[in-house]
Each structure stands twice: as structure tokens, then as C-alpha cells.
Amino acid sequence: MPTRRTPTQRQRRLGAELRKLRVAADRTTDYAAGLLDMDRTRIANMESGIRQINAERVRTLASNYVCEDDAYVEALVAMATQERGWWEEYRGALPSGLLDIAELEWHARRLLTVQAVHVPGLLQTEDYARSVFDAVLPTLPRLEVELRVQHRMRRQRVLDDETAKSNVSFVHEAALRMQFGGTKAMHTQLDHLCAASERENVTVRVIPFSAGVFPGAGHALLYAEGPVRQLDTAQVDTAHGADFVHAEAQLAKYRAHLTWMDDRCMNETESRDLIRSIAHTL
């Protein structure tokens, strides 16, 4: 199979999981190469996501690595057989990290977010999103701003299609009071957020100022639950783009953050009332 110059995050994750299985089984790349009748360099390339691997080879490796978790193996097979997603239309026009986020959301079982400064991307209006991208430095060309807005709106389909994802958003009160795009745009955004929070698959809970300090205050978090727990992924925003995390120790830390939020945030009704109250003051 051909090699890839720039594997996606999902492709790299599949390779990392296959390497994890091999190491756990105490097998070498030579052993894996023998199973698949190929050079061991190709195994290294598969484990880095550079070279494609088909479903049959995933099953062969998992079986010989003595992985008896059928659900996990089937999830890996699905990663190897995925079809081209809508986000690929933007490849070469937008940063790959934005496409990786869209792909992560599309394949997740449930999505949880923590936002201290912005309204969560999946719940943003066009005008609000545009104001966020207009503030990027160095300044983005108008075409790229509009492409990013369009891409963000299309991402929101994961909450709307026939298999709508469950979404839980923890939003700090500060994000509700920062007037991105001006008073009118923010009023519309808060109304939109309230309406979204009434949908069956969407939960919005506010971290009030009175909560004081909270874990992970310095960054935004997206936690995507995979089809099996081993394939959960945390995505953290950085000044240089999206950072994807899947080491178990790190995932445990972010799950602890989310548990803290669940225990201490305002409930859904209180959160909605506060959002409406802030909107009425604009």
C-alpha cells in the first residue's frame, strides 16, 4: 500500500494502538513483518501512520498479539476501513489540525468540552465564530476566515444528524460575558446557546465566577469518548494549534477534570437561567 506524506491524527492513532498491542505482547517488528510477509521498515511506517493497513492485516496482528478484546479489535478494524469524510474537502485550504478535530468529533461516541473564554465551537453562531477568527494573529485573509467559519458550521452536523452525538459543554461564566462580535452578535449567541441546551442530546452547564479556581483553567479541552474506552482522546488548544492526547495517564487526568466540573458546576436549569439573565443585560 502507498505511503502518506501527512497522515491524519486518526491514522497516527491506529498505528500507535497497533504498536501498543505489539509491545504489550513483547513482540518485535521483525515478528510482525514475518506475519504480514513484508519488510520491518513497513511495520514501523504502519505504526507511525505513514503506511496504510487494511482490516485483514489489523485482525492478523491483533490475533497474533493475543488481543482478546473483540470490541477493541473491531474498533481498530473500523479505523482501518473508514471512508473519506466531508472534512477532506478542506485539505490544503485549512490547517490539518482543524480537519483532525472534525474527524475526531465525527467518530466519537460522546463529546465533552470545557471552555473558559469561548462558547464551544459546536454551539457557536456564524457571527460569533467569525469574530473569533477575525481576532487571530497574524491576521487571516478574508477567504480563510470564511472557510474556517464554514468548516465550523459543518462540524455542527454531528449534533444534528440521525445519529446525533451526545454533547456536554462546561462553559465558564467569563465566556458568556465576553462580547465577541459586539453586543448584538453576543445576544444572538446567548439565545442560540439557550436554545441548544434544550435539545435532548445537548447539555450546557456553567462554571460560575463563584466557583473560583478550577482545574485546567489555562486551556480549552475537548474530550472525545471513542467506541471503546481505550480509544478515548483528549484535544487541547495551544498557541500553535490542536494537541491530541491519548496516553492513559493523561486521559485519567482529564477525566478527573471533567468529574470536578460535573460535581461543582451549576445544573442545567440554573445554567440556562444565568445565560438568559446575561443576555437580557446586553
Image (tube, helix red, strand yellow):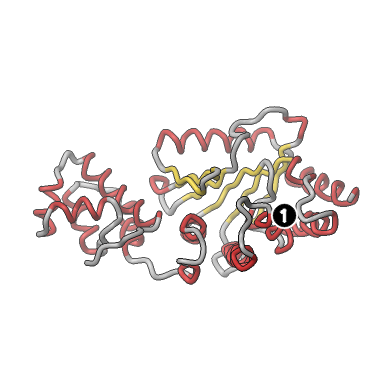
**In the figure, is residue 205 to the left or right of 224?**
right
237 to 14, vertically: above or below = above
- The image quadrant of residue 210 is top right
Indicate the amino acid at tag 1.
Ser
Q: Number of numbered discs present?
A: 1
For this orientation, the residue located farthest to the right is 281
At mark 1, the secondary structure is helix
Q: Residue drawn at (63%, 55%), measured in percent from left and top?
A: 139
Q: Nearer the viewer, residue 225 or 150?
A: 150
Q: Nearer the viewer, residue 174 or 19?
A: 174
Q: Residue drawn at (73%, 46%), measured in percent from left and top?
A: 268
Is disc 1 surrounded by few (<14), some (14 to 19) or many (20+) residues within 10 Å? many
Q: Position of residue 249 (x, y in %)?
A: 42, 33
**In the figure, is residue 21 to the left or right of 30?**
right
Q: Position of residue 158 (x, y in %)?
A: 57, 63
**In the figure, is residue 241 to the left or right of 229?**
right
Q: Position of residue 129 (x, y in %)?
A: 68, 58
Q: Quadrant of the N terminus?
A: bottom left
Q: Residue drawn at (48%, 71%), measured in percent from left and top?
A: 89
Q: Position of residue 39 (x, y in %)?
A: 11, 56
Circle 1 residue: 197
- The image quadrant of residue 189 is bottom right
Q: Nearer the viewer, residue 235 or 75?
A: 235
For this orientation, the residue located farthest to the top is 213
**In the figure, is residue 74 to the left or right of 38?**
right
